[in-house]
Amino acid sequence: MIAKVSKGMVAFYVGITAFLAMILVLFSFLHANNIHRWWQVLFESQIFFIPMIIYIMVISVGLGLLAYFLISVFRKSLYGEIEEKLRIMAAGNYENPLVTEAIPHSKENHYIAAIDKDIQEIAKKMQEISAELQQLNSRPQLVAGQTKEEILEIERHRLARELHDSVSQQLFAAMMMLSAINEKAKKDHIPEAQQKQLEMVTDIINASQSEMRALLLHLRPISLEGKSLRQGIEQLLKELQSKIKIDLKWDVEDVSLPTGIEDQLFRVVQELLSNTLRHAKAQELEVYLHKIEQNVLLRIIDDGVGFDTSQQKAGSYGLMNIRERIAGIGGTVKIISFKGQGTSIEIKVPLVSLTSENSKD
């Protein structure tokens, strides 16, 4: 396949070759007419007040550009549909008709037909791998007679109960006491510096309470407890809206998915919401879940502080965990974030099914 750099190099060589060829023809013509200072003719001979050398250079550049254009058209006509198939596959749409169907007229070109066949085989294998991953993920993994999810759920309940009964209650009590102290301080007209210190302590406790709510949200049960994915997400967002001062918007479609995938997506939503509350300092948060063709698309957008996606930090463990969860069900994660401009996280999970042959196995 002719790469972009190769096209430029071919155009450059065509231009240089044309330039040298015209110079050689001119030299041969002048030498045959006993004109020895041929190079002076290039600069002194003019056509419409423009030296001949300029015409030769312009013609050479024009021939180079023409070669570049012709190569681009040839490349697009020959490999354009192959490149389109690869782009669709890279987006995870393995069952798209443009991927599974043969390229028209590919039989006329055995090389293109062979590439097209290989791409279809790769798409088929990717469908099978994604389906097997999703099936494997839905099977319970036993540890000492209990599934890993049961062990995690028991531990999450224990941690959530202890945090709620101890730290959360103490923070609430401290906040109530501090409110009374602030009211008394205003009545007694204590110095402004001390009032500012009390306000700082109030802000710290408020931030701690928000952090505690985010942690408790993170420790909720991993399963949907019999609810659909849409019901679970909407209930989660409504509870969050009643406890946290943040502008929430959501558009969640009622999609039917295997239980294992629904539980994983629900857990991912929990982790993303928890990360947003703990780190993003966002005022607005949007959640979207839709089925688009043969994919489930989950998108969460906030207007928080953002971060540099190229830097690996200790706080990125949550995102690493999310990537692992989504990879485990054959999906992809795309993160777009800029400092001070918020974050957009897009998760795409293909809805694939095993072929009848694999299903029997």
Image (spheres, grey):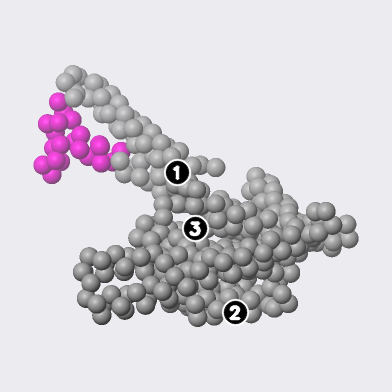
Q: Which residues are magenta?
A: 40-60
Expressed as whole percent of the image width and height from the top left, the position of residue 3 reads 49, 42
The residue carrying pointer 3 sits among few (fewer than 14), some (14 to 19) or many (20 or more) residues within 10 Å by Cα, namely few
Task: Find numbered disc 3 in the image and state the secondary structure of the residue it sits on.
Answer: strand
* Residue displayed at 37% across by 77% down: 180
In which image quadrant can residue 303 be found?
A: bottom left
In primary-sequence order, the first of circles 3 and 1 is: 1
| Position above or below: 58 against 278 | above
Q: Which residue is mark 1?
A: 4
From the viewer's perspective, tell me whether residue 289 is left or right of residue 224: left
Task: Find numbered disc 1 in the image and state the secondary structure of the residue it sits on.
Answer: helix
In which image quadrant can residue 226 be found?
A: bottom right
Instruction: Identify which amino acid the numbered label 2 is placed on.
Output: Gln
Distance, label 3 to label 1, CA atoms, is: 28 Å
* Residue displayed at 44% across by 47% down: 311
Q: Of the numbered discs in the image, which one, if any, rests on residue 235?
A: 2
